[in-house]
Amino acid sequence: MKTNFTQVASVLLAMLLLCSSCASNYKLLSPEGIYYNAQTEDNGLLFNYKYDVYALSNNKKYAKKEKRKMLQVVAVKITNNTDRILDTSQDIRYFIGQQQVMPLAPEMVHSQIKQSVPSYLLYLLLFPVQITTTSQTNGMEIEQNSFPIGLILAPGLTILNMSIAGSANKQMLGDLQRYNLANRKLLPGETVYGLFGLANSGYNPIVAKLAE
């Protein structure tokens, strides 16, 4: 018995092309455990930040989407060393050079860099794929048998990848919402950790200043 090499190669090629874009699980972020090597200080406001948090946490899908969308998710650490309560939205301003920048809402970041769940419907293209085997005796073809491997692979891979991508996107949004610093009250001496998105920052230095 031998297997039709052309059909096997077609199956393997289809699987290789599709699996190269398989859905990825999400690794939860922990801004509290990040080493911050960038720091600024303004009148008692201590600000630390870190770019590339998705790449550092091995969330490769989201790190690639960041670059394509020209958006960076930044981990931050803010310490209030003033003698008053600070509102993170009203009393703190962020600057890149001389330009003030606004952190993006979690939902906006999520919509820009989430994995595309419907794109994994492409696995359904494997439905027609079959493996054909031919039995031979003394070089003469005796019988051909076809196995519809696509009927198993297509729905299985589609459901699996859509489920993984949907769950990962939900976890990513959960992280962004959990560490959203908008409208937080920061007591004197208190330190908070957060995540926010910046558009077109170009990885330039970020400065946090107290609002005048």
Image (spheres, grey):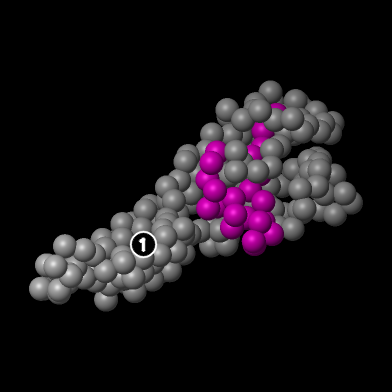
Image quadrant containing the N terminus: bottom left
Q: Amino acid at mark 1?
A: Leu
Q: Position of residue 98 (x, y in %)?
A: 89, 51
Q: Position of residue 21 (x, y in %)?
A: 46, 59
Q: According to the image, label 1 marks what residue?
A: 12
Q: Along the horizontal axis of the image, is 96 left or right of 139?
A: right
Q: Secondary structure at mark 1?
A: helix
Q: Is residue 174 visible?
A: no
Residue located at (54% from left, 48% from top): 60
* In the foreground, 116 or 5: 5
Q: Is residue 208 visible?
A: yes
Q: Along the horizontal axis of the image, is 71 left or right of 17?
A: right
Q: Along the horizontal axis of the image, is 78 left or right of 112?
A: right
Can residue 132 be found in the magenta stretch?
A: no
Q: Along the horizontal axis of the image, is 55 left or right of 118?
A: right
Residue located at (63% from left, 48% from top): 73
- For disc 1, the neighbor class at 10 Å (few under 14, some 14 to 19, many from 20) is few
Which stretch is magenta? 57-79
* In the foreground, 161 or 29: 161
Residue located at (59% from left, 58% from top): 65
Compared with residue 99, is residue 26 higher up or lower down, i.e. above or below? Answer: above
* In the foreground, 132 or 170: 132
Compared with residue 193, is residue 174 higher up or lower down, i.e. above or below? Answer: below
Q: Quadrant of residue 208?
A: top right
Residue that protrudes farthest toward the top in the picture: 189
* In the foreground, 64 or 39: 64
Can residue 78 be found in the magenta stretch?
A: yes
Q: Position of residue 195 (x, y in %)?
A: 61, 43
Residue located at (34% from left, 70% from top): 6
Compared with residue 162, is residue 170 higher up or lower down, i.e. above or below? Answer: above
Q: Quadrant of residue 88?
A: top right
Compared with residue 47, is residue 3 higher up or lower down, i.e. above or below? Answer: below
